[in-house]
Image (tube, rainbow, N blue to C red):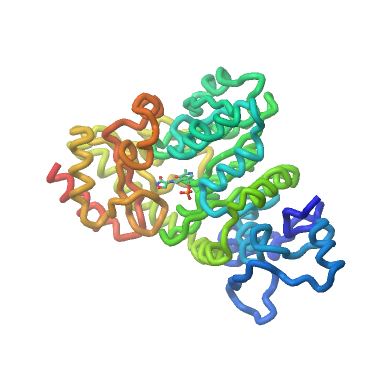
Amino acid sequence: MLSHDTRAAGTEPTHTHPTAGFNTRLVHPQADGDPYGAVNVPIYQSSTFAFRNAAHGAALFAGQEDGYIYTRIGNPTIRALEDTVAGLEGGYGGIATSSGLGAVAAVYMALLDAGAHMISTASVYGPTRGLVEQHLARFGVQSSYVDTSDLARVREAIRPATRLIYVETPSNPAMQVTDLRAVAEIAREHGCVLVVDNTFASPYLQRPLELGADVVLHSVTKFINGHADVVGGIIVTRTEELQRRIRPLMVNLGCNMDPHQAFLVLRGLKTLALRIERAQASAMQVARWLETHPKVSWVRYVGLPSHPQHDLVRRQMRGFGSMISFELKGGLEAGVRLMDGVRLATLAVSLGGVETLIEHPASMTHAGMSCEDRVAAGITDGLVRYSVGIEDVEDLLADLDQALQAV
Ligand code: LCS
């Protein structure tokens, strides 16, 4: 069997600072020491790695020795990111991918056989759902989309062929929150793997593996990198067994991360906690301000007591993050005016960066869903999504104020 890893079989990743706290691990990535003492993990921009001799090459391919063969299989810069994020999530190991959707695809393809059934949060990021409904369905994968915040709906959807439960919490953009401990119990009872998309929270605010999930994944394009200059993804597995099921699929699919991407993400990661603390403090102010605005019909922010799962959020997350969804009284037309009226917030998809972004899910990120599925998932036509950045909050409020006056 060919090696699909940079690590010899049965070897646990060892941590440079095994007792270090979360913030320390952000700043000091898990990496092999650099011979020149470089403070940052260097970019190993090399497609291939020389073997010392033929026996060394054979040992690497056989998975008997740690080391690097070829960058699609593994690379020191990429591995530093994988080991660091795995440590932050409390998992066995990481698998970095070319995009968040690459991570989703690798997990689905590794864990779902023809005829298998999966259950997913209905209000997931649109293409995550499209991947199954438009593509994997052709290979015989069956899927049900339910409001996973309602545990009865999850139980009802279980079939004999159910192998995987996929939860996005908080969900994009409906901000629905799923009780991970409870769903993990359901998954265990029925022999299913629980996969959690932790993109909206980041490991700083929520650690699904500690609540019973088996696999966590991220679009690192968002909070983990945080600077709107990289598209990337990462998978973290709780066990070595799951790592050995998913990693070969990623390697054979060829959706690996690039070393330069990994370098940028390692740099962005250093300030994850600082960025989130700042953005979520502003988000709370913006959400409260919107909630009292006469032109706003409702606001969904997990930090507001008006959020239907606010108590669960307090138990499950260590903060509220910086994603806000809201609806204007004037519906879609008012939303369009608002998006065309803001001057500081940028009208763009994506989220979780240092700059504030605004977008309209029904016509943009979730346009691929049928109108019926969208409304069932809580994504109404007038819903506006606002990703709060780290600007001065007074400037963000002034910007919203002037744009809302024109609505
Ligand atoms: N999971 C979540 C929760 C996401 O929000 C996204 C992208 C993905 C996975 C896919 O990650 P990617 O391949 O883009 O790195 N969400 C986007 C959004 O809401 N606007 O633009 C992209």
Q: Going 40% across and 26% down the picture, which residue do you hit?
A: 373
- Residue 41 at least partly seen: no
Taking the image as shown, residue 293 lies to the left or right of residue 67, namely left
* Extreme residue in the front direction: 138
Give percent across and percent down for residue 121: 50, 31
> Which x, y percent locates residue 191?
70, 27
Q: Position of residue 181 (x, y in %)?
A: 60, 33
Q: Is residue 385 left or right of residue 151?
A: left
The extreme right residue here reads 55
Q: Which of the 4 image quarters holds residue 208?
A: top right
Q: Residue at x 47, y 26 (%)?
A: 147
Please identify the quadrant where the C terminus is shown: top left
Residue 403 at least partly seen: yes
Residue at 51% across / 37% down in the picture? 131
Q: Quadrant of residue 382?
A: top left
How far from the left and from the top, in percent, is residue 20? 65, 61
Looking at the rendering, which quadrant does residue 45 occupy? bottom right
Instruction: Name, please, the residue furthest toward the left.
Output: 406
Q: Where 33 sits versus 322, above or below?
A: below
Q: Nearer the viewer, residue 373 or 30?
A: 373
Extreme residue in the top direction: 156
Residue at image coords 42%, 52%: 352
Task: Work out whether residue 321 or residue 70 is closer to the camera in this orientation and state it.
Answer: 70
Does 29 sit above or below residue 253? below
In the foreground, 372 or 199 = 372
Count of labels in the image:
0
